[in-house]
Amino acid sequence: MSKTLGDLGERGIYRTLLTPRYQHVEGFGDDSAVLGRGLVASTDSCPTPLIEKLEPGISAFHEGWLLATINLSDLAAAGAEPLGLVVNYTLPATTTTEYFKQLMDGVDACAAKHRTQVVGGDLRDGKEKYLTATAIGWAEPRLSRRGAEPGDALLLIGDPGYLWAWAATREREDLPKQLRRRLWKRASRPKAQLKAGRLLAWKGLAAAAVDVSDGLYSSVRLLTEANGLGADLAGEIELDAELAKVCELAGLDSFALGQTWGDWSLLVAVHPEHLEDAILALKMAKIGVRRIGTMTDSHTELTVGGVEWTGVDQERFSERSWQGGGIEEKIRALQKNSSGSV
């Protein structure tokens, strides 16, 4: 009897079905496909945004914004300049024109924020809603998941923690109003780290890169597996100062909150001789950056302060998928994972 995709899990699918078939293709396994002549492309579908689950009835603008962000984030991991988005909308005939306008407004606004635009697409009717986009970019030189070496520093770039900070404290009456507004703004308008990816690629400062689309643990694992290395992380992650209050209220530490998903950060490995220049360049560009660990020569072993790190895992086609379980269950998992222990 044939196994199911659920039997294999995402990693098993990649290892046993995809790798034997496509490993000869340049860039296979990276966030973006390599088309040649400097062109790269990535395609992703948009799940129901967590922000929509937190705020039922919220404008479809947020779905559109997220659809664009998801795809542009893959270009960021390639160090690419975006050339455009091609969108594919399958919508029931009962969809209101207002919903469709809000959806397009979100995509267009996010694209404009990242200095690109929708250049084409497809619209069709169907019984269920499916939102997909393809981002096309130009990347020379190009960043890849491969190229890291033992001793490389791991940098987490962007503004991690905001989406789940909002999720964990949204119903608390003791959350200061100004902080509540800032959390909502950052959580509902995540940005792809295109500027950071381009900067590091053009200056030759990043050895390897991957976007943080499914949480930090998943991204660190992807980077170590691509390079046949391990990683040792620090026991805390430097977050924006305003998130300290969230950690206090929600019973989380900075490590737990910093390893969440939904903020579309970028994880890069940097050779030691380039570390100072990379951090300086990012800070000069007013891009958030913090060192969170080091690549090691222990084959795919992940540790925090030398102790095994099981992390808050995310694997599609498995019970570990972020798509399963409720929001409160995920928050409890983060609380349990504080300081990297499970």
Image: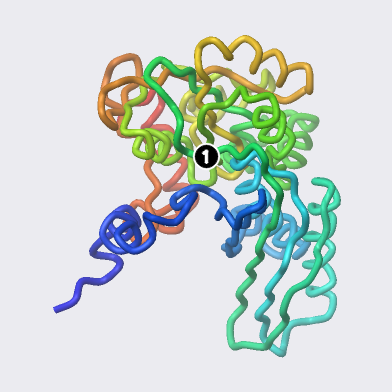
Q: Residue at 65% across / 31% down in the picture? A: 201
The answer to whether residue 81 is left or right of residue 8 is right
SS class of the residue under badge 1? loop
Q: Identify which residue, 111 or 171, lies in the foreground.
A: 111
Task: Report whether residue 225 is seen.
Answer: yes
Residue type for callout 1: Ser
Position of the N terminus, as image quadrant, is bottom left
Q: Residue at 69% across / 86% down in the picture? A: 124
Furthest residue toward front: 37
Q: Is residue 25 above or below residue 329?
A: below
x and y, in percent, of residue 8 in the image: 25, 61
x and y, in percent, of residue 90 in the image: 65, 80
x and y, in percent, of residue 325 in the image: 41, 56
User: Where is mark 1, residue-wise?
Assistant: 144
Task: Report whether residue 163 is seen.
Answer: no
Q: Residue at 74% across / 61% down in the picture? A: 85
Q: Residue at 71% across / 48% down in the picture? A: 138
